Amino acid sequence: MTAFVDYYKNSLKSLKLEFYSEYMSDLSDEWITVLSVISQMKAIRELSLVMTIENLDAIQSIVDYHCEVFVNQWPQLKRYRLHMCHLSEKQMKQLPRLDLVLNPSTEIMGHKLDLTSKSLSPLKRLTHFELDIKNYVMNETFFDSIHTHLPHIQSLMVTELKITPTIEAMLKMLPKLKCFRYSGYTYPMFAESNVGVVNA
């Protein structure tokens, strides 16, 4: 990071940085060090920071540094955006909506995706779920017992999917499902009505 800042600090006008806890230490000191290094880039006019932090104990120190020190080092900024995210396991289980994007490496493009609805079963409050699959082939086993694992789903979207009689039968077992979208189509779902396909 230091080498990047030294090279661009007098020339770069716009910068967007995304930090994820899996690549950072749980200690707040490391996050604060990164922020202090970034603040040397005095040519920046537009700055966007996205920070995903898992360690709840580290968040307060980072927020304090950001508000008391970091933001006061950028008088030249014309536009600034900060997105800081922390989700605990308890919060995850309470999510009503989830958008999941899976983008594979080129080595596994075209392979079947063995994601199951059972793996999402802790999210019992989920009512809206979007699964955006990039260059995967969706395995129909995802829909096995989906009415048991995700009983409150009202809206479901899955890309890269070919509807089969098995999938259709599983979807009809979801008691609250009202809308199902896949591969550019909308599939209105109502417990008392027949399923019809409408081009989205």
Image: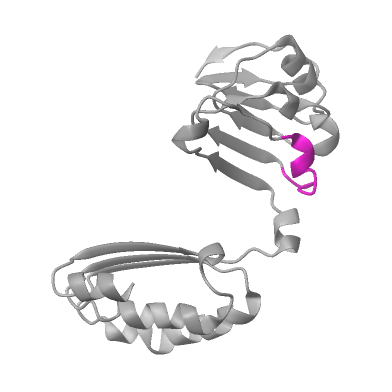
Q: Read off the magenta span.
A: 116-126
Is residue 17 visible in the rendered image? The answer is yes
Residue placed most toward the observer, 141 or 56: 141
* Residue reaching furthest to the right: 148
81 w.r.t. 102: above or below: below
Question: Is 72 within the magenta?
Answer: no
Establish if 33 lies above or below 122: below
Q: Position of residue 128 (x, y in %)?
A: 66, 39
The residue at 26%/69% (across/down) is 4
Q: Quadrant of residue 3?
A: bottom left
Colour scheme used in the picture? one colour
Q: Name the residue at the bottom extreme.
A: 68
Q: What residue appears at the point 36 percent right and 83 percent down from the top-left corner?
A: 36
x and y, in percent, of residue 140 in the image: 70, 22
Q: Is residue 79 left or right of residue 56?
A: left
Who's the residue at 45% across and 86% down the image?
A: 65
Give the vertical position of 110 relative to 25 (above or below).
above
Question: Left of 189 or right of it: where is 11?
Answer: left
Main SS type for the magenta part? Answer: loop
Residue 159 spot, x, y in % from top left: 55, 27
Question: Closest to the observer: 102 or 86?
Answer: 102
Task: Give yes or no for residue 122 being in the magenta stretch.
Answer: yes
Q: Is residue 8 left or right of residue 151?
A: left
Residue drawn where x is 60% and y is 12% of the image: 197
Snapshot quadrant of residue 194: top right
Question: Relative to residue 60, is residue 84 depicted above or below?
Answer: above
Q: Nearer the viewer, residue 4 or 163?
A: 4
Among all residues in the image, which is located at the extreme front?
107
x, y percent for residue 30: 48, 80
Quadrant in the picture for the N terminus = bottom left
Asked whether 125 or 145 is in front, the reply is 145
Q: Quadrant of residue 37?
A: bottom left
